[in-house]
Amino acid sequence: MPAGDTPCVCPQANGNRADARWVCLTAPDGTGLRVERRRIGFTARPWSTAALDAARHATGLVRSDRVHLHLDHAHHGLGSAACGPGVLPRYVLAAEPASFSVALRVLR
């Protein structure tokens, strides 16, 4: 399990990192990919979102031979007001057009 991921009996999305300036994924030989942006959210896991959704228990997650990288422009804050407070106004993510660009650099 990647560093920082929370082991759960029933697997769920976790491990998101917010407000990073860059993400660098490298192989032992130093080759890889660097993603840069002023502010970026990302998650990197050894399984796909489909595999994560399909697994009923942590033992059902099988590492793939790939790293699945998800890049996010923004995230809605936590809270739904279903059984507690809602999202604080400054963390509400409105559904509106947005542009999102990143710089990709191949590391050799």
Image: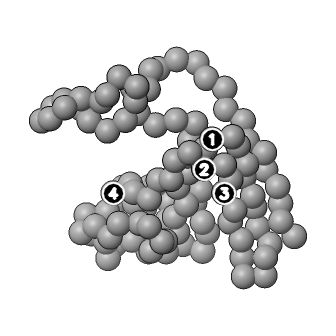
Quadrant position of the C terminus in the picture: bottom right
The part of the image, by quadrant, that contains residue 54 is bottom left
The part of the image, by quadrant, that contains residue 30 is bottom right
Residue drawn at (68%, 66%) of the image: 25
State the residue position of label 1. Answer: 39
Question: Quick one: label 2, few (<14), some, or many (20+) residues within 10 Å?
Answer: few
State the residue position of label 3. Answer: 23
Residue 12: mark in rendering: 4
Amino acid type at image mark 1? Arg
Instruction: Say whether marks 1 and 2 touch (CB < 8 Å).
Output: yes
Amino acid type at image mark 4? Gln
For label 3, the SS is strand
User: How much space separates mark 3 and mark 2, taking CA atoms?
Assistant: 7 Å
Residue drawn at (76%, 67%) of the image: 32
Amino acid type at image mark 2? Ala
For label 4, the SS is loop
Give how far across and how far down residue 82 sits, in percent.
15, 32
Pick whichever, 7 or 10, lies toward us.
7
Mark found first going from the N terminus, 1 or 2 = 2
